[in-house]
Amino acid sequence: MTASAPIRLALPVLIAIAMACYLAFPDYLGLMASILIVAAFALSYDLLQGYAGIVSLGHAVFFGIGAYTVAVLGSHGISEPLVTLAAALVVSGAVAGLLARIVVVGNDFTRLLVTLGVDFLFHEAANKMRWLTGGADGLSSFEVGPIAGLFAFDFRGQTAFFYALGVLVLIYLAVWRITTSPFGLALRGIRDNARRMHAVGAPVARHMAVTYVLSGAIAGMAGALLAQTSNFASLDMLGFERSAEAVMMTAIGGTGSIPGVVLGATLFTWLKDALSALSPKYWHLGLGIVLMASVFVLPEGLAGLPARLGRLLRRPR
Amino acid sequence: MNASGLLTVLVDGIAYGMLLFLFSIGLSITLGLMRFINLAHGAFAMGGGYVLVVLVGMAGLPFLLALPVAFVAAGLLGAALELTVIRHVYRKSELQQVLFSIGLAFAAGAIANILFGPQQQPIPLPGWATHMVTVLGIAISGYRLFVMGCGLVALGLLIALFNHTLFGARVRAAVDKRVTAEGIGINVGRLFAAAFSLGAAFAGLGGALAVGFLGLDPSFPLKYLVIVLMVVAIGGPGSISGSFVAALFLGVADALFKYWLPEVGGFVIYAILVAVMIVLPKGLAGKPA
């Protein structure tokens, strides 16, 4: 694949950009940390949709479970961030394992509906289980300890920034490793033509289920990051809107392109922050217009932009 | 629980089901015929609702006059969007369709919010609508009866249209073998535009009727998205009678469970969805999505 060279280059560039932003805008560390977290979530969704071709409208379920895992453990005295991060990974991976079977059956349309239904089920369940989740008020009075007993979360958001960056880099490497492995190649085969992969003897359903579990576990880590850095877990973290956001960020960035998705998540979060400052209704309007336009203008997302520009430049000759 | 209470809930559920049928029929057509996953279908229903709010609530027009206007306006809106933008989305991948239509739904909700504000829109219902009628010992509001009547009339008209007219025959031909249908001179592009705008019109009628029943606010297109998708999925995309049965079933199930078990009422409908999709991935009518 010719894409591997830019991918190798992308991680150092990403870290360099993050560090440059850190030095240039020290007042926006909170926003930057949330961008890094959302990028991690989008990466987990890209693994599912961009590589295995599973379109899901309920991916926030795992994000929310990760966040609630941190919050519930934190209010029971288990507050070490690395421990709760690992717990979130395990819990959301386990839930994904339980759901995998019902998500993998059927075609794209039924999968869309099943994931949507599952998302609403979990949202409703979390809303009703006030004793565990705090219902509509969410959970906020839980403890988040210093990372490895050394780095406490500070008000400036410095620890949160570096912590989120570190976990994002880890997730980035993991997704990269998964997608460039033989397993990842099999996933691309399934995405492009599941029937043919079936014919060559690939265990299509099992591959899809494994991807769903991996992707769910990573999404849970992203949710845990958000709960730890914001000291808050609430219903909107597993709602439909957040699920839809994952789909959008991935598509805007370019499905199946890891750096593209990180870029897409950054642009999306920045746009959301800027437009929401005006008014939530303008955010929704702007989002709608961007989405509709992206289908026509940038069908391959931001990641497809260089190739598209290249084609445009080459055409006159 | 007494029997008449149960029957009242049942009637409520049937009326709700009729609204769901009107909402979903257009989506069933677009999904079944054009394989277009239109998550923005609820926007046409919302459009019809706001037309009614403007005409009845603000201009003071009679309710029964405003209903057909909402029907026609939503149909025209559907036709305008289909002819300009949406027809270019049919060829895109499923993901692109999802993105485009979610974008459209968000934009529609935001526009309604900017124009009318985020609050619920009240309309004055005519006297006959609030009047209670006793049928077989159950007291039913005139409005519920009227909604049910509209649903049945729409069902009859649609079945007649699709099964007994040249238009319906052409549509069915295009669904089964698009290339062949084009080969014998059917203009499938124009046919799709007509079917799309017809679906939008019925959604608009449903939305207009829903104002006095479910209320109307800018979150409307997303709020009923799931249940409308469920109706289509359970009924089987492209099947009118399937949608009707599924809509009634879901409307009644939702009303009954919310009445019986208010603690878990919200779950049941989603649990049914997940269960049906596992057991019957192709829906009741059995056509592939």
Image (cartoon, coloured by chain):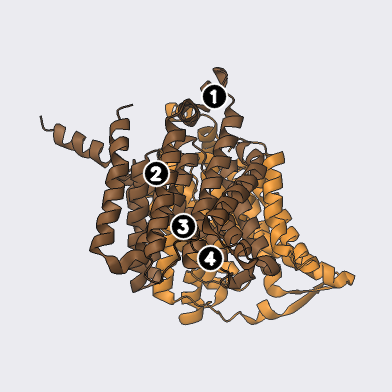
Of the image marks 2 and 3, the number of the one nearer the N terminus: 3
Q: Which of A125 and A314 is in front in this view?
A: A125
| Disc 2 to disc 3: CB gap under 8 Å | no
- Residue on which the image places disc 4: A144
Q: The brown chain is which one?
A: A
**Label 3 to label 4, Cα distance in Å?**
55 Å
| Disc 1 to disc 2: CB gap under 8 Å | no
Question: Do badges 3 and 1 share one subunit?
Answer: no
Quadrant of residue A211 within the rendered picture: top right
**Label 4 to label 2, Cα distance in Å?**
47 Å
Q: Position of residue A60 (x, y in %)?
A: 54, 54
Name the subunit of mark 3: B
- Residue on which the image places disc 2: B89
**Hey, what amino acid is under mark 3?**
Gly
| Disc 3 to disc 1: CB gap under 8 Å | no
Residue at 56% in and 18% down:
A199
Eyeballing the image, is B81 above or below B183? below
Name the subunit of mark 4: A
What colour do you see for chain B? orange
Q: Where is residue B51 in the image (x, y as percent from the top left)?
A: 47, 70
Q: Where is residue A85 in the image (x, y as percent from the top left)?
A: 54, 54
State the mark number for residue A195: 1
Residue at 65% in and 49% down:
B243
Residue at 40% in and 41% down:
A255
- Residue on which the image places disc 3: B75
Circle 2 SS class: loop
**Label 2 to label 3, Cα distance in Å?**
19 Å
Q: Position of residue A288 (x, y in %)?
A: 38, 58
Q: Which of B11 and B120 is in front in this view?
A: B120
